[in-house]
């Protein structure tokens, strides 16, 4: 029927919303306008029509009998496109309206005239129109009346909006006043009589509003300040300068003194005339006492003057400088005191600051303390703000003979204080600047009067940030954002509104993942205000601490490894809200994990069984390296994206896998899984690591007890083997010895090496020892400086079967080097390197001993037992090969043996 400009529609709807007129009850001022229009134009029907989306709604009507019609039937939709009165003399003849149901059916309207309702911004909201059931036309006078009445409609809407906004502003200001409990906010008339008294004023000063309304505000000034006319001076300063500030002692109702800084500002009416004052006080007693103590201490600590960063000066009675500390010279940008000696201190200040400096000087000369803040330049012209205290230095008779001036550079602090002062001056801005979340809401009730929802009337940025709700939330209801929110918080707010009693409670919002402490109080009969304090981190931290205490208590009471794993999984899953949690043993070589019972959230199938890591992504190498794998969304992470379907089948969307390592091997894993994308927090990862550590410690306790039982059984077997080894060593040593002393020395060394290898084996895991520790232990007696031995190679475990032989071989090599080779000189060095290589699909270890820096090597003329021990050590028993050579630069020995032979667990007979 007619074109619709979307931008025009959006502007119209926005303006309409600002008037809050749609669907409101009938009002006499609008009803009177349509009656006047009907009578003045001689028409049976008159309407105030407002266009709202796909309908036109009538704020007032006479002779029509309906409250709205579809926009498709609206003739006023044409009128809003005009700048003046719009007429159609015969609607049946106009192609725009001939088929309109209002013309062809029902009222059978024949004539239409409408004046657009345009706001001051030029937005057409609708039209004031008159209708007739016969063709007609308006006289110029009638058109003038219709146009004038249309202006009256808009004027009435503007007035309603202004009044409503004024009420909203007053309500918000009241809410802010009641929330600002750390500030005493008092309003006064021009005579200084109290007209309002904030809750903060009641808390700080002691009097309530009923006691103070109509009373003079100077009751909280000290008698001395009242006698000096300080209250009147503040009001005069506020009138003349726009503000009056003070920082002084004040009185509470109980007579106690407190130090406060305050500000007084004039209040003006709508025409700009002064009508009173606003006084804001803040209790700064604690800060003032701390500052006073610091300054008093500084006055008596002459010994630290040279290191003080304050500018500390001594003046004669004429205010001439006689001393300045080194810190003062630095902050004043003076090269030496000669630039300042004898200068008038008050001349450094300008304007009001100079007057304040002189006042402080006179106060100190009178025996008191002068204090002020002011701006003065350094000697190099750098402007700075100073906090200055002037105190007397008394002579033996107690009379002031000199003055101590302590000036502190408060430039940065002053800038900060100025920001705070501006904030306090503009106390209306407290609402926007509050750190706590704050919102005002309106209770929505059903037909039975029961509360079931609430609408956001106002929210501050802090609430938007805390809750995750957009600032555009205003005007919408909580159930629009959280449809399943339980009724109890809504009922609590309704109870606050009904009883007027404030309430404090906690609320968890799973959709937002937050927990809040809420402080609610009533604003009006339908509205409430609530302050939100986010306590989520504290609650979650408490839950994690409680969970760890519970885990420790329950682990102490069980020795069943399966039960330990189940308890850890249950507490981890319950605390972090997981879909799966558990502890599984890992086959490092097969790259698989065996999961037992584990823990699974309700309604989700378990994942017990054996799983191959590479079936679910490419992160196994990180786990083998001992690194945690943390993935927030398996569908986005390149390590799991291609296998996201397999993970989805297990109800896994995000994962946290913590590897447990033993001797460099990946042996077990604690897993925490969620069925939704999730950004893991550092504290949650730390908690999971804690659970993993405690679980592994409990399992290690059980394993240690089992190892102890196994060790006891092996001791007898090892003792027999060791005695046989001692017998063999002694026999071979005595057989080849040239004399008894040599035999004793060689035998003792070989027995010590045997003893060290057994110490190592019994000190670590039963039947096994890391290769580097084994080598270092065998060479320990020869390591007279850190540079003697250079060790390099990968980590692996040497079994009991090879540990003794390898230890003895190394001892023989080291003994020979100490006698004849690199260890016999001060600069000699031995490097022991080992590497792993593949021989026809089987891993081998190649270990090389190489001496450097010793005397020239001469091959031996005969083969002794030690040499035979070296040559035979790993060959016959372990399938290895030994190559012992004698280059002139130093002995070289290469051992090549299968890794499986080196890691065998049983000790061979000699």
Image (cartoon, rainbow, N blue to C red):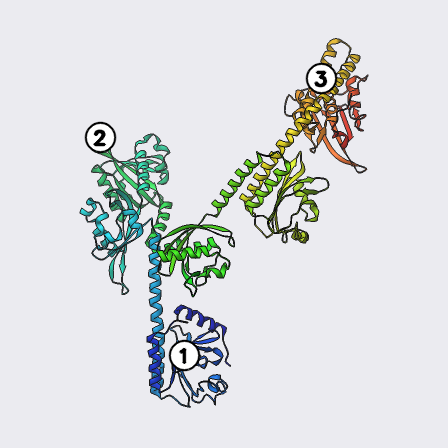
Drawn side of residue 503 relative to residue 398, left or right: right
Identify whether 38 is placed above or below 218: below
Dot 3 or dot 1: first in sequence order is 1
What residue is shown at x 76% (from left), y 15% (from top)? 727
Q: Is residue 426 visible?
A: no
Residue 618, percent from left and from top:
68, 47
Classify mark 1: residues with Cα within 10 Å, few (<14), some (14-19) or many (20+): many
* Mark nearer the viewer, 2 or 1: 1
Instruction: Look at mark 2 in the image and give the residue it sits on.
Output: 395
Q: Nearer the viewer, residue 714 or 271?
A: 714
In which quadrant of the rendered view does residue 812 lie? Answer: top right
Instruction: Report helix, strand or loop for mark 3.
Output: helix
What residue is shown at x 77% (from left), y 12% (from top)? 734
Dot 2 or dot 1: first in sequence order is 1
3D distance between C-alphas at marks 3 and 1:
114 Å
Residue 751 — which label?
3
Drawn side of residue 358 relative to residue 585, left or right: left
Instruction: Look at mark 1 in the image and give the residue it sits on.
Output: 127
Q: Nearer the viewer, residue 288 or 604?
A: 604
* Mark nearer the viewer, 2 or 3: 3
Residue 114, percent from left and from top:
40, 82
In which quadrant of the rendered view does residue 359 lie? Answer: top left
Drawn side of residue 560 relative to residue 12, left or right: right
Q: Is residue 661 visible?
A: yes
Instruction: Report helix, strand or loop for mark 1.
Output: strand
Q: Give yes or no for contact between labels 2 and 1 (Cβ–Cβ under 8 Å).
A: no
Dot 2 or dot 3: first in sequence order is 2
């Amino acid at each position: 029927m007619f074109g619709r400009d979307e931008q025009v529609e959006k502007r119209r709807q926005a303006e309409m919303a600002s008037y809050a007129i749609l669907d409101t009850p009938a009002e006499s001022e609008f009803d009177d306008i349509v009656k006047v229009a009907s009578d003045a134009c001689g028409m049976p029907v008159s309407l105030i029509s407002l266009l709202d989306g796909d309908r036109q709604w009538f704020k007032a009507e006479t002779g029509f009998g309906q409250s709205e019609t579809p926009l498709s039937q609206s003739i006023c939709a044409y009128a809003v496109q005009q700048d003046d009165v719009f007429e159609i003399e015969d609607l049946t003849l106009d192609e725009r309206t001939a088929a309109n149901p209002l013309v062809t059916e029902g009222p059978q309207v024949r004539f239409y005239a409408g004046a657009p309702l345009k706001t001051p911004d030029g937005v057409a909201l609708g039209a004031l129109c008159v209708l007739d059931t016969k063709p007609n036309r308006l006289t110029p006078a009638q058109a003038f009346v219709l146009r004038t009445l249309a202006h009256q409609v808009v004027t009435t809407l503007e007035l309603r909006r202004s009044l409503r906004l004024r009420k909203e502003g007053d309500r918000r200001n009241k809410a802010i006043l009641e929330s600002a409990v750390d500030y005493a906010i008092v309003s006064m008339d021009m005579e200084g009589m109290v007209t309002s008294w904030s809750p903060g004023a009641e808390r700080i000063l002691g009097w309530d509003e009923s006691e103070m309304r109509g009373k003079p505000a100077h009751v909280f000034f000290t008698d001395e300040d009242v006698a000096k006319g300080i209250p009147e001076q503040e009001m005069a300063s506020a009138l003349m300068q726009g503000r009056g500030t003070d920082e002084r002692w004040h009185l509470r109702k109980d007579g106690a003194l407190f130090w406060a800084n305050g500000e007084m500002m004039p209040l003006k009416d709508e025409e700009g005339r002064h009508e009173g004052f606003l006084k804001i006080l803040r209790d700064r007693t604690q800060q003032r006492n701390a500052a006073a103590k610091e300054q008093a201490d500084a006055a008596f600590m002459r010994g630290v003057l040279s290191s003080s960063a304050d500018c500390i000066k001594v003046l004669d009675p004429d205010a001439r400088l006689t001393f300045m500390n080194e810190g003062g010279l630095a902050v004043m940008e003076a090269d030496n005191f000669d630039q300042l000696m004898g200068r008038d201190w008050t001349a450094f200040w300008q304007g009001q600051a100079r007057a304040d400096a002189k006042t402080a000087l006179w106060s100190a000369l009178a025996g008191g303390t002068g204090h002020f803040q002011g701006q003065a330049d350094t000697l190099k012209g750098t402007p700075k703000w100073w906090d200055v205290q002037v105190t007397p230095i008394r002579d033996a008779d107690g009379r002031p003979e000199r003055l101590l001036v302590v000036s502190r550079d408060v430039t940065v602090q002053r800038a900060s204080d100025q920001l705070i002062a501006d904030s306090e001056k503009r106390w209306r801005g407290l609402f926007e600047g509050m750190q706590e979340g704050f919102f005002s809401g309106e209770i929505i009730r059903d037909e039975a009067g029961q509360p079931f929802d609430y609408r956001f009337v106002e929210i501050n940025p802090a609430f938007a940030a805390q809750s995750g709700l957009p600032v555009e939330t205003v005007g919408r209801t909580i159930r629009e954002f959280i449809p399943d929110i339980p009724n109890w918080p809504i009922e609590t707010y309704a109870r606050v509104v009904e009883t007027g009693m404030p309430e404090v409670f906690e609320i968890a919002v799973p959709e937002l993942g937050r927990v809040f402490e809420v402080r609610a109080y009533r604003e009006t009969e339908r509205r409430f205000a609530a302050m939100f304090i986010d306590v989520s981190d504290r609650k979650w931290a408490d839950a994690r601490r409680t969970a760890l205490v519970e885990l420790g208590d329950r682990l102490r009471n069980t020795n069943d490894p399966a039960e330990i794993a189940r308890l850890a999984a249950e507490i981890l899953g319950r605390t972090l809200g997981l879909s799966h949690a558990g502890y599984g043993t890992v086959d490092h070589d097969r790259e698989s994990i065996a999961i037992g019972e584990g823990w699974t959230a309700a309604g989700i199938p378990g994942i017990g069984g054996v799983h191959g890591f590479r079936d679910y992504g490419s992160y196994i190498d990180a786990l083998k390296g001992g690194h945690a794998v943390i993935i927030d969304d398996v569908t986005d992470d390149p390590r799991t994206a291609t296998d996201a379907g397999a993970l989805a089948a297990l109800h896994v969307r995000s994962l946290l896998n913590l590897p447990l390592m033993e001797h460099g091997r990946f042996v077990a894993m604690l897993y925490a899984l969620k069925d939704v994308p999730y950004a893991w927090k550092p504290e949650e990862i730390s908690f999971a690591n804690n659970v993993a550590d405690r679980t592994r410690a409990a399992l290690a306790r059980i394993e240690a007890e089992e190892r102890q039982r196994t060790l006891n059984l092996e001791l007898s077997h090892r003792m027999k083997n060791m005695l046989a080894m001692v017998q063999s060593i002694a026999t071979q040593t005595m057989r080849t010895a040239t004399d008894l002393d040599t035999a004793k020395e060689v035998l003792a060394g070989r027995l010590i090496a045997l003893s060290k290898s057994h110490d190592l084996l019994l000190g670590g895991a039963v039947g096994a020892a890391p290769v580097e520790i084994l080598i270092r232990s065998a060479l320990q007696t020869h390591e007279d400086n850190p540079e003697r031995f250079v060790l390099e190679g990968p980590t692996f475990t040497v079994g009991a079967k090879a540990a003794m032989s390898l230890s003895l071989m190394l001892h023989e090599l080291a003994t020979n080097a100490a006698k004849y080779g690199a260890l016999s000189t001060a600069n000699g060095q031995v490097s022991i390197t080992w590497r792993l290589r593949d021989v026809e699909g089987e891993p081998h270890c190649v270990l090389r001993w190489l001496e450097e820096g010793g005397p020239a090597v001469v091959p031996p003329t005969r083969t002794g037992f030690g040499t035979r021990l070296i040559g035979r050590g790993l060959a016959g028993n372990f399938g290895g090969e030994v190559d012992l050579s004698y280059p002139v630069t130093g002995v070289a020995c290469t051992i090549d043996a299968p890794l499986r032979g080196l890691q065998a667990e049983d000790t061979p007979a000699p």
